[in-house]
Structures are given as C-alpha cells and as structure tokens.
C-alpha cells in the first residue's frame, strides 16, 4: 500500500466498524492515513437493543443516539464518517446508493478497502453491504461509468471478522497486530452505549486473535489482533 493512501471502510450499521475493524482504523489513522468510514445505515432497527430499552423511545431518537455514538467512536479512532441513512432490516440496494458509493471510490481513491464478509446468516444487511462495496468498486474501475474522476485502480479488499465466523464462511488469512492502538479501540467500543454487551466479547476475541498471531509469527510482543480475509490475491514480488 502506497504511503499515506486513504483507507475506505464500509459499515452496514453504526457500530460494525468499531467492533470488527476499530484496530485497523486506529492503526492507519495513527500512521497518517486518511480513513473514511461509510455507514450505510444507523442499525436503528436491528442493532440498537440498549436504546430501545429506554422508555418512550422512537425510531428518530434511536437514529440520533446511534449517529452520535458512531461519530464519537470514529473521532476516538481518528477517522471521518459519512452516514448514508439507507435503512436497516432491510438494507436495500438502490441505484442512487450505488452511484453514491461509486462516487466515493472515485473521489477518495483508497489504497485499501475494508468491508463485511460475503455471507452472514445472522444479519442480511452485512452481506448486502459487502455486495454493494464490491460492486461499486468494480463500477468505479470502468472507464465508461458516468461519474467525474479517473477510473479507479485495484485497491485490495480485506473483509473484517463477522460475529460468528464459522457460519459466515470466514477463514482469516491476515492477523493484524493492533496492540499499539488497543487503548483507542477499547475507548471507541466503550462509547457504544447501545451495544455494551459486545465490549467484553470483542475484547476477548482480540486477545485470542493476538495469541494466534504470536503462534503464527513468533512475535511475543503481540497481545491484541484483528482477523481479516482477503477478497483478491495479494500481489507481491517475493513470497517471504
Ligand atoms: Zn451490523
């Protein structure tokens, strides 16, 4: 990845990027990369149980709460965030949404893309977000697609870890050491009040992935890691 290339992150809901890719986001931001997160929806229906338990809650208020939490988390991670408010349960593809995503690719020109896994039987919005992010990338590469900006190159795409990887066909081929930015990820997770039940789950997961990273590298300094799976083959000049 070229020095200081932007990173583009696709998040179906307001908090997916925090649990699943918060370490990568904080890591690249800390190295001076622009990190831009696209939240396709607020997860107002499907992923806001804490907010809905409050008396007198309305869908509009849930959206406001999730947006505020998500903005705060992105700030803690050092990233910018755009909310597309495309709805959840279900998140649906529309021509205007696809065009917006293609425009993001053409203007941001990412050197790395992070997105959801291809499958997730627990939440259909996640594979939809994955599909949209990959389709828009291909359209942005087409010379004839009628949007401003030169055609996109071929930024690598890494899928972040779903909640139950075995059921989602997710097999990691990258373990990213996020130990140096773990405090930032933990602070961002703590800020997601509507889903506090997930904080310890993802803290435990990062330690398990960290232990596996040590086993696969021999590096004893790794404590926390995130798992990723590449969509396309990695292009390299050497194998080791
Ligand atoms: Zn989600």
Image (cartoon, rainbow, N blue to C red):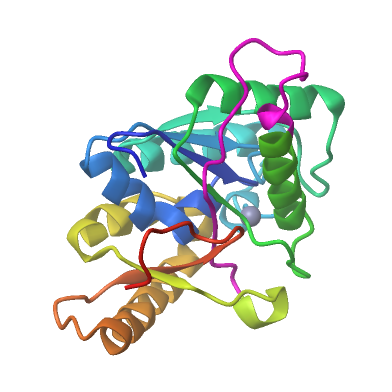
Residue shown at the point (77%, 18%) measured from the top left: 144
Q: Image point 37% across, 47% down: which residue? A: 25
Q: Is residue 183 above or below residue 105?
A: below
The answer to whether residue 131 is above or below residue 163 is: above
- Quadrant the N terminus occupies: top left
View extreme (front): residue: 237
Q: Residue at x 75, y 23 (%)?
A: 99
Is residue 105 shown to the viewer in this render?
yes
Q: Is residue 131 above or below residue 154?
A: below
Q: Can residue 58 be seen?
A: no
Indicate yes or no whether the magenta region holds residue 146.
yes
Q: Position of residue 156 (x, y in %)?
A: 52, 49
Question: Seen from this angle, which residue lies furthest left?
Answer: 221
Q: Position of residue 47 (x, y in %)?
A: 65, 55
Horizontal side of residue 33 vs 59, given as left or right: left
Left or right, 48 with respect to 136, comes to: left
**Within the magenta stretch, is there residue 84?**
no
Which region is colored magenta? 139-163
User: Quadrant for ligand 1?
Assistant: bottom right
Reply above or below: 177 against 189. Answer: below
Q: Quadrant of the C terminus?
A: bottom left
């Amino acid at each position: 990845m070229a020095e200081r290339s932007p990173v583009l992150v696709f998040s179906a809901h307001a908090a997916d990027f925090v649990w699943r890719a918060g370490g990568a986001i904080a890591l690249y931001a800390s190295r001076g990369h622009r990190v831009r997160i696209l939240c396709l929806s607020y997860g107002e229906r499907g992923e806001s149980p804490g907010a809905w338990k409050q008396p007198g809650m309305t869908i509009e208020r849930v959206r406001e709460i999730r947006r505020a939490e998500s903005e705060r988390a992105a700030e803690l991670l050092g990233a910018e965030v755009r909310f597309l408010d495309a709805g959840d349960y279900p998140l649906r593809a529309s021509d205007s949404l696809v065009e917006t995503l293609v425009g993001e690719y053409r203007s941001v020109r990412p050197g790395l893309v992070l997105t959801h896994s291809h499958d997730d039987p627990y939440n259909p919005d996640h594979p939809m977000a994955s599909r949209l992010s990959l389709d828009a990338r291909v359209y942005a590469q087409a010379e004839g697609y009628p949007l401003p900006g030169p055609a996109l190159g071929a930024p690598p795409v890494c899928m972040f870890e779903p909640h139950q990887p075995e059921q989602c066909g997710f097999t990691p081929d990258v373990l990213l050491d996020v130990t140096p930015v773990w405090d930032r990820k933990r602070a961002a997770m703590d800020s997601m009040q509507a889903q506090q039940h997930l904080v310890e789950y993802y803290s435990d997961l990062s330690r398990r992935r960290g232990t596996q990273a040590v086993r696969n590298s021999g590096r004893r300094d790794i404590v926390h890691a995130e798992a990723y799976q590449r969509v396309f083959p990695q292009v390299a000049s050497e194998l080791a």
